[in-house]
Image (tube, rainbow, N blue to C red):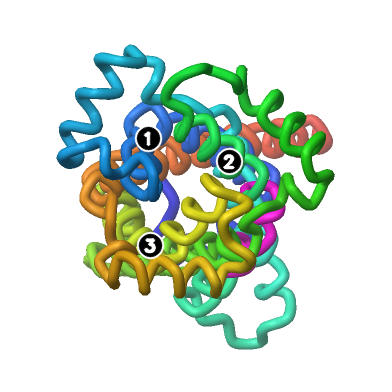
Amino acid sequence: MLDIDEIPAEHTAQTVPSFFAGLVGGLAGLVVGHPFVKVRLQSRELASRYAGTWNCFRTIIQQEKFFGLYKGMAGVAIVNALVFGSHSWLMELQAKHNGAPSPLRDTFIAGLGAGAITSLVTCPMELAKVQLQSQTSGHTLKGPIDCLVQLYTKGGIRMCFTGLTATTLRELSFGPYFFFYASTIQYLAHSPEDQEKPKDVILAGGVAGIGAWCSTYAADVVKTRIQSEPHRYTSTLHCFRECLKEEGWRVFFRGLTPTIVRAFPSNAATFMAYTFTLNAITQASQKETASLREKAVM
């Protein structure tokens, strides 16, 4: 595993490997976590249909079968790859320009930047996911691509980026995400020379997931409201005010329970798969470099 004190350094030198490792991590997190219930409970129209989290879960299984849990989830792993790749790239930039690097500060800033960058990709994907998961009958939308094509036909490219501001605010959670992970790993280490243990990676990944969601959950609720009813709200601020006026402050925490429940195992799996894959790629690269050097000497 990566050395504790080398977490930022390892990220900075491996932007491309981090992308592929992030892809594997995203797939692992997708298999373990199910963010489906959150969208249904956040939706203004759909929330009233369910008595609670587990009622929503059972209803989806009964009415839409198991695959109903994964509606609109195509592409989540790609977004995860972009996040980890962007984070590594931004860490590299900071390492080049900062004379006295501060690992926790740098990883927090890189996380914020990664979230802002990937929001441009995340927004249309999230829009398609919300539209698909809000669809309970009729099946007028056949999939993410069909959804975006229909939205483009109705309102052009701007329609495909509905909720971009709210999405960007939500994606800034990657600042706390990487900060909580790095700080937890640092806290669990007995010394700087210690290596990451699987149990530490699992715990830190779970803590990172919960901390990140709690930091920007209100923005996620607003994003979901805007994207589920694109023509109802004129802006992010308008949506926030309307939700607050009509349903009170508790609306911004609706769906938080299932999100936290799935955040720990999902992000623990993500970081475990990411760390294992990155470590494997790094070792393979080091062996290849050593082999080439031996041949050059001979």
* SS type, badge 3: helix
Instruction: Tell me the magenta residue range.
Output: 112-122
Mark 2 near mark 1, Cβ–Cβ under 8 Å?
no
* SS type, badge 2: helix
Disc on the earlier residue, 1 or 3: 1
* SS type, badge 1: helix
Q: Amino acid at mark 1?
A: Phe
> For mark 1, does the 10 Å Cα neighbourhood hold few (<14), some (14 to 19), or many (20 or more) residues?
many
Q: Residue at x 40, y 43 (%)?
A: 39
Q: Amino acid at mark 2?
A: Thr
Residue 35's x, y, as percent? Answer: 37, 38
Residue 223's x, y, as percent? Answer: 51, 57
The front one of 75 and 241 is 241
Asked if residue 230 is positioned above or below residue 28 in the image, the reply reads below
Q: Residue at x 56, y 63 (%)?
A: 166
Q: Which mark is residue 36?
A: 1
The main secondary structure of the magenta stretch is: helix
Disc on the earlier residue, 2 or 1: 1
Q: Residue at x 24, y 32 (%)?
A: 56
Mark 1 near mark 3, Cβ–Cβ under 8 Å?
no
Q: Residue at x 34, y 58 (%)?
A: 208
> For mark 3, does the 10 Å Cα neighbourhood hold few (<14), some (14 to 19), or many (20 or more) residues?
many
CA gap, disc 3 and disc 2: 35 Å
CA gap, disc 1 and disc 3: 15 Å
The front one of 116 and 72 is 72
Q: Which mark is residue 217?
A: 3
The mark lying in front, picked from 2 and 1, is 1
Q: Which mark is residue 282?
A: 2
